[in-house]
Amino acid sequence: MNLELLLSYIQNKLADDLFQLGLYQCMLSFLVACFVAVVSIPVVIKISELKFLMEKPGHRSSHKTATPTFGGISIFAAILISYFLWPAIDQTDIYRTNLSIVGMSILFFIGIKDDMVGIDPNKKIFFQVLPSLILIFFGKLRIDYLYGIFGLYHINDVFSVLITCLIFITIINAINLIDGIDGLAGGISTLASLTFGSWFLLTNHFAMACLAFTLAGALIGFLRFNFSHTSKIFMGNTGSLILGFLLSFFAVRFINLNNSFRFDPTSFFNAPIVAIVILIVPIFDTLRVFLVRIMAGRSPFSADRNHMHHIMIDNGLSHAAATGVLCAVSLANTVLFFLFHRDISNTVSLFILIGMFFLYMAIGVFLKMRARVRAIDKPRRKGLYLSQLASAFSGRNILRYL
């Protein structure tokens, strides 16, 4: 994507009547979704308190008091009302977006059951695969072009279905796993939705753009209560499964459309890399936690406090500060990649991301070590910090800090 051409393209778009109509619809959807979430969440909180539907603090929890955990209900309602309130401007993606609402509804009810009584992990995976397959087969949504990564371009249907399904499962679980502190899953998802939505809007895919901005508006309304001290609520699995599914949908469709419009000034020749960068925090954190657990001889799905947000909290940061840092990292990576990605092949970009992941691992080791030292009595902290720093990277000792 050429930046000068893009700026000229945007200027021309602003004078287009159809684009203006799409822009107004996206803005209205955003505002209505935010309003519905703000109005409905107090009702959900009240019902949760009356029926004792609260999440109690545990050894892995970052909160101190019992808190309602059904914020996903308001997010779901806000998306449905705001998206279907307006007539469709274009028919390009209407069927696919409608199918995404079907898939989102399936995950909504699975999330409610998981929040209330729990659900078997195998069944949870099955109900993540099911809505993904609905979009893959009925909506013909799949990754069938790899943009020259490792010399691969077009791939056959079997691998296309498998890769697309894997993307859905990975992103859904990545968003679910980072939902551990106030505002993190909501903040990251808001940034990603606005980024994908802006691109869909510029390329006249108004149905996709409207859905993306609707999700962002619902999340802004939710975050107002998620950060509250007097009327706090969590999104729960109900909300995080919805977010992960819709972000997966946006990412896969973004990759598809860039393949179809390779010669458009708004297209990206490295769309898969861009999609990873936009979702870099949840993807990196999930890969890191799984790798750490496997290296420690445990199941990658076992529960612990090894997520980066837990480590940052253990280092003394507040929920808001930890969320702010990780959201800033996500935003900075996206902006820097857009500025400097030109003239770099997709294979090289992937190797750069792999190098960044190992840097992320090293930062995790350092912060984990610092958190352990911080827990020691203050008079002894300084000397022990230096001694542990010297021995941390010797032999198997590193596993203690992963």
Image (cartoon, helix red, strand yellow):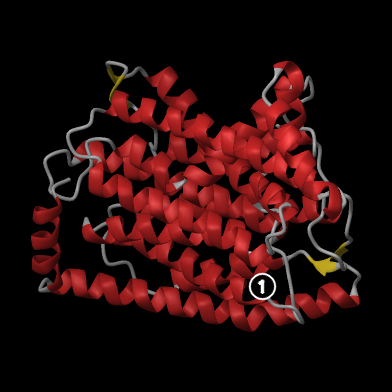
| Residue visible at 13% across and 46% down in the picture | 264
Res. 322 visible in picture = yes
Q: Residues within 10 Å of mark 1 (few under 14, many from 20)?
A: some
Q: Position of residue 84 (x, y in %)?
A: 45, 69
Image spot of residue 180 (x, y percent): 71, 53
Spot occupied by residue 108 in the image (x, y as percentages of width and height):
66, 55
For label 1, the SS is loop
**Viewer-proximal residue among 186 and 20:** 186
Q: Is residue 171 visible?
A: no
Identify the image quadrant of the N terminus: top left
Instruction: Provide residue 211's location: percent of width, then percent of height.
Output: 42, 62
4 vs 30, nearest the viewer: 4
- Compared to 232, does 92 lie above or below? above
Instruction: Name the residue located 11 percent from the left edge and 71 percent from the top edge.
Output: 16
Q: Amino acid at mark 1?
A: Phe
Location of the C terminus by quadrant is: top right
Q: Quadrant of residue 52?
A: bottom right
Left or right of 177 on screen, residue 163: left
Residue 225 placement: quadrant: bottom right
Q: Residue at x 10, y 74 (%)?
A: 15
Residue nearer the viewer, 320 or 163? 320
Residue placed under numbered mark 1 in the picture? 227
Report the residue at 66% width, 43% height from top.
Answer: 367
Q: Is residue 109 left or right of residue 199?
A: right
